[in-house]
Image (cartoon, grey):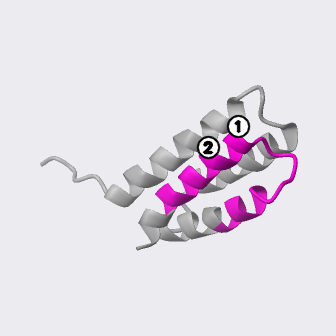
Amino acid sequence: MAEKKNPNTETLNAAVVALEEIATNPSTPKNIKKSLTDLVGELKKQEYSVSVRAANAISALDEITQDPNMPSYVRVTLWQAVSTLERIRE
């Protein structure tokens, strides 16, 4: 029997891909890359449910987006990732 995929897991994976793209972009400041790399690692851990990981990531991304040295296009992309993660909590 085919395994049914969890839509929340797929949504989480989409957010992880977006965050990884920002973290590997050469124009992203190093401190933001480090924060995003750590966050992606936490999102990939299976210790907590998908909704708990998403809620924790939203909180962390809120702090990351407050960095005054962040380029505006990075901030916009992070907000898009937050929007994606917010769909999981519902």
Q: Residue furthest left?
A: 1
The answer to whether residue 10 is above or below residue 46 is above
- Within 10 Å of disc 1 (Cα), the crowding (few <14, some 14-19, many 20+) is many
Q: Position of residue 79 (x, y in %)?
A: 60, 54
Name the quadrant of the C terminus. Answer: bottom left
State the residue position of label 2: 19
> Is 70 covered by the magenta stretch?
yes
Q: Which mark is residue 69?
A: none
Q: Residue furthest top?
A: 26
11 with respect to 29 (left or right): left
> Is 23 covered by the magenta stretch?
no
Q: Which residues are magenta?
A: 59-85
What's the CA distance linking mark 1 and mark 2? 6 Å
For image coordinates 55% across by 46% down, the residue present is: 16
Q: Position of residue 63 (x, y in %)?
A: 77, 63
Q: Amino acid at mark 1?
A: Ala
1 with respect to 48 (left or right): left
Say what secondary structure mark 2 lies in: helix
Q: Amino acid at mark 2?
A: Leu
Q: Residue furthest bottom?
A: 90
The answer to whether residue 67 is above or below residue 29 is below
Q: Residue furthest front?
A: 72
The answer to whether residue 29 is above or below residue 82 is above
**One can see residue 45 in this view:** no
Of 71 and 60, nearer the camera is 71
Say what secondary structure mark 1 lies in: helix
Q: Are marks 1 and 2 in contact (CB under 8 Å)?
A: yes
Q: Position of residue 85 (x, y in %)?
A: 50, 60
- Within 10 Å of disc 2 (Cα), the crowding (few <14, some 14-19, many 20+) is many
For image coordinates 46% across by 45% down, the residue present is: 14
For image coordinates 87% across by 46% down, the residue present is: 69
State the residue position of label 1: 23
